[in-house]
Image: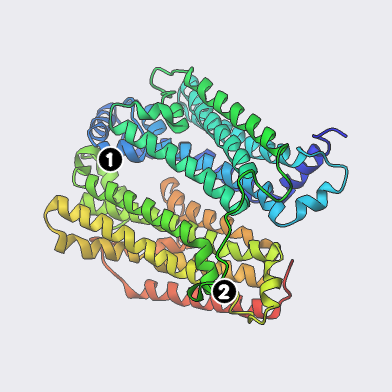
Amino acid sequence: MSGLSGTGALLRLYLRRDRLVAPIWVVLLGALPLLYAVSFEGLYPTAADRQSFYLGTEAVPAQAALVGPIFGSDLGALVAWRAGLMLTLVPLAAILTVVRHTRGEEDAGRTELIGSTAVGRYAGLTAAVLLAGGGVVATGMLAFISLWAFGLPVTGSLAFGASIVVVGAVFVGCAALAAQVASGARVARGYALGVLAAAFVLRAIGDIGSGTLSWFSPIGWSAQVRPFADERWWPLLLSLAAAAAFCAAAFVAASRRDLGSGLRAERRGRVAAVPSLSGPVALAWRLSRGTVVVWTVGLALFGIVIGSSTDGIGDQLGSSTAISDALGKFGGTTLEQSFIAAVLSIVGIMVAAYSVSALLRLHSEEEAGLAEIVLATGTSRLRWPAGHLLLAVLGPAWLLLVVGLTVGLTYGSATGDIAGELPSVLGGALGQLPAVWVITAIGVALFGAVPRFATLLWAVLGGFVALGQIGSVVGLPQPWLDLSPFTHVPRLPGGAFSLEPFGWLLVVAIVVGAVGSGAFRRRDIRG
């Protein structure tokens, strides 16, 4: 029997299991460049407006660190610069997809069950790589087609789509290798995401300096393709070579390890349990504390970059009335305050994604049969999920506090008015919390009532983002925008605070969460 026997059948199985999640991230990420093109054309309609924006952006190193280098003032070049975050988001989606269908399946015991049939040794790994790689290619093609259809030059559109595909391919291979090296899915995700974080940091530091470090990062290679700005095609070869090397190493490693183990042995724990780390709540914290630390450090750095660059944002954005009106929708009485409010709305979505991830760990543990083991010890039905629920509820509060403090302190220091700026910025950050908790409550309801569809919580979050953030750009009617909880958060800093929508969001979160908890107490445990 060939080592690839059954690959087609497994690929069809993975496609069926990801029939909702995969199209969502492909469409949302692939459509982002088009939305940026529509936005830039409306906000900066003349060449002079775009030139002013380009000069202002080029003069702010923090913008290069956060998004990437900007290579020109043409509409296409501005869109390619603003969509530079896709060079990080697409690899993130690829990593999660590969690890879920490789080590995630092994941890759940399904790989061993499937392996007892006529399935080759490398079939599962190959199917996961093909699935994630296909999603990456589809995202790049959608970005290319949408920009070309919008009227941008075909060469630049093709270069942008290709830059997305190759950086995604690199991290498909990276995740495949991490899945063979690590001792489990959680560790594999940590390894692959660590490489992604290192690539982002190298690119960021390189872009605000001489540019040398950017050439040590796959993200930097794709940025140097320079879509719509005298395209350079040869950096694509660097990414393709790295992707091939990672994939080859993954298949070699797969031939040298036992099922359920990794090339790197799992570290032994303590002989005796530490009293402070006993119980379901403490166990959830021990499993998630590394993730919390990474999110804390990442958002703190993000807040410092935003706060330090906001004081000069007026020069970057220029005097466009359209941009002032667009930012004014987020609140604030000045352009700087409106910009901070807009950034905080994006942070709210990021923190909601953390909450979704923390909550869905319960679903993963139940599917893997760990819930039955814990409940067999006498742990009550509500005590078992308590730890992950607390992290999903209190974790966002902590992260928003960190962002509010870092943005407020750095921006206040730049303006010389910390006492005046910090409270309003902090209020704007924490004001996102009720909307995040509504997402968490919906997740509790899905997990409690229909656990089979718990992962649809990602689709719910994506839908709210499409309604509240993207819908405002394309001009959806207000009743549609009101369906998103993020539409009703306080418009701070600088805006008016209304207690009524704030309170209603909390009531909705409490009621929906209580319904989900009650449903969980009554249903059977899956495993």
Q: Amino acid at mark 2?
A: Pro
Which of pointers 2 and 1 lies earlier in the amino acid sequence? 1
> Can residue 352 be seen by looking at this rendering?
no
Residue drawn at the location 47% of the way across and 57% of the way down? 290
Left or right for 92, reference 490? right
Q: In the displayed structure, would residue 173 be above or below residue 351?
A: above
For the C terminus, the quadrant is: bottom right
Q: Which residue is labeled 1 in the image? A: 62
**Mark 2: which secondary structure?**
helix
Between 127 and 154, the one nearer to me in the picture: 127
Query: Splitting the image into 4 quarters, where does residue 323 fall?
Result: top left
Q: In the displayed structure, would residue 376 be above or below residue 139?
A: below
Q: Which residue is labeled 2 in the image? A: 280
Badge 2 local density, few (<14 within 10 Å), some, or many (20+)? some
**Mark 1: which secondary structure?**
helix
Q: In front of the other: label 2 or label 1?
A: 2
Q: Position of residue 482 (x, y in %)?
A: 45, 62
Residue drawn at the location 32% of the way across and 38% of the way down? 65
